[in-house]
Amino acid sequence: MGMIMGHDAVGSEFARESNDGQIAVRALLSAIVDSSHDAIVSKTLDGIITSWNGGAEAMFGYRAAEVIGKSIRLIIPSDRQAEEDYVLSRIRRGLRVDHFETVRQRKDGSFLDISLTVSPVRGAQGTIIGASKIARDITERKRFEREREQLLAQEQTARMRLNEALKARDQFIAVAAHELRNPLNVLHLTLQLLQRACRDPQRSAQALALAEKSQLHFDRFASLVDRLLDVARARSGNLDLYREDLSLSGLLVEVASRFKAERPDILITVETGPDIRGSWDKLRIDQALTNLISNAVKYGGDKPIAIAAAADAGDAMITIRDRGIGISAPDLPRIFELFERVAPGSEGGGFGIGLWITRRIVEAHGGTLRVESEPGVGSTFTVRLPMNARSTD
Amino acid sequence: MVSSEEVVLLLEDDDDARTLLGELLESEGYKVVSFANGAQALKYLEHAELPCLVILDLRMPVMDGVEFRAIMLKDPRLSRIPAIVVTAFDPSAAANLAVQRVLKKPVNVQSLLRVVREYC
């Protein structure tokens, strides 16, 4: 400037510049407010909207002209109206509401998550004349949070399942150890008795009987080991099938006769139509039928067991029906699980793998295994086996 | 060979093991009464003469060895009967059963007979 002016001149110049500065600052502030992506809104102490920036238009879908003069409650969902009472009560007392996370409603009715900061606006005399509110859209952040929570829940579920599986495995190891220990114990006993008998020439007949018994116990032990190996094979999906032309009727009669010989006290009937033939793995189907009939014998309460087979549209249908203790509805889905033994204290013992491996065998043949049961009435297992290979083996 | 009228009570759920142990003890001159679970044995003990020894398997269906022994110990008449445990499990499972001996499966016939001779 460099010029010396009179006092008044300086004063009026200053006033003009100051006035210009205020206008410039207002314009600047207005530009900042307008260009903000956050919604910046002012309202009276009654909640009537007095300003509405571009951010608010974009966020809530209302143009400024549509909402100025209307209540802010327009964008508050019906179940959150009380929030406005709370906010206004704080503002009237000169208090802010900071980063309050809530939900608001757009013009199209959809909801969005926002973080809200509301501050009192004071007039020239310092009295509170309204409120300014800044809302930030946190829908994305909330979505991430929800996704993270979901992932966390999924992780927890997976961890829980893993723990259950580990527990089942440990139980299985305990059961397997017990099941293997028993025949081993018996074999050990038999051999010791055999030694004693061998020392006495008068007991050669007993010695021979004990030697034969040893063989039986050895076979029992070997078959338990085979069953354990089966689990390993079937779990890794390597249940190899050696298909051959097989008479199902013949096999059923054969398997049933083994049980009849073992348990002559139980009436076991086999009803098959004309010879049902198919391309199946004889040893595996024998194993599956043996497991199912053994199950019926074990849980059948010594009552009659009815086995039937019939051909049905390219499939063989086999039903094994007992009249035993049955299985309760909550237990039904579990019986095909590995290592599950639903019936308590089953005297036959076992690994709890019989029905599991049976289902694997049937499914490897492209078939299905179903069960219907009623506690106290009995159980019916139904095997459906395609006669010709159309499986995935 | 002994000729005792006293009974050895044998509890073992495995049919073969029970039969073999029974035959062994009988061949040594003992009288053997055997059961597959604790409940059957308790019923027997209600009216029978007390045995000289109980040989007890721990893991059995219906009523296992631990429960059976606990009931025995609560009964003044039955608590006097000596018992030995024959188990495939950790011998510590028999820690609170006040038994005279714990033998591990597979059981050694000589050790078993030595213990039986002590009490019968």
Image (spheres, coloured by chain):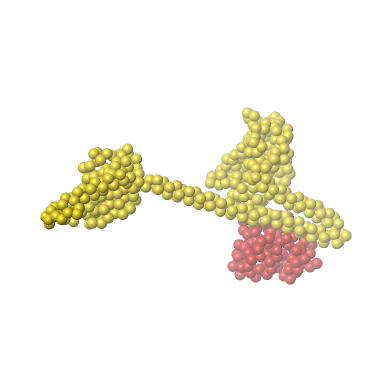
Chain colours: A yellow, B red
Q: Is residue A184 left or right of residue A351?
A: right
Residue A87 as seen in the image, left or right of residue B74: left
Q: Nearer the viewer, residue A52 or B51?
A: A52
Check the image and report above or below for A343 versus A362: below
What percent of the width, then of the height, locates residue A330? 53, 46
**A92 vs A373: above or below:** below
Q: Residue at x 22, y 54 (%)?
A: A92
The residue sitting at 86% across, 57% down in the picture is A204
* Looking at the image, residue B23 lies above or below residue A61: below
Residue A48 position, x and y percent, is: 22, 45
What residue do we see at 63% from left, 51% from top? A346
Task: Tell me if residue B106 can be seen.
Answer: yes
Quarter of the image with the C terminus of chain A is top right
Q: Residue A355 versus residue A111: which sits nearer the camera?
A: A111
State which quadrant residue A67 falls in. Answer: top left
Q: Residue reaching furthest top?
A: A313
Q: A20 or A345: nearer the eye?
A: A20
- A67 lies left or right of B1: left
- Name of the residue lying farthest toward the right: A201
Residue A310 can be seen, yes or no: no
Locate residue A382, reporting x and y percent. Answer: 62, 38
Taking the spot 71% from the left edge, 46% from the top edge, the residue there is: A263
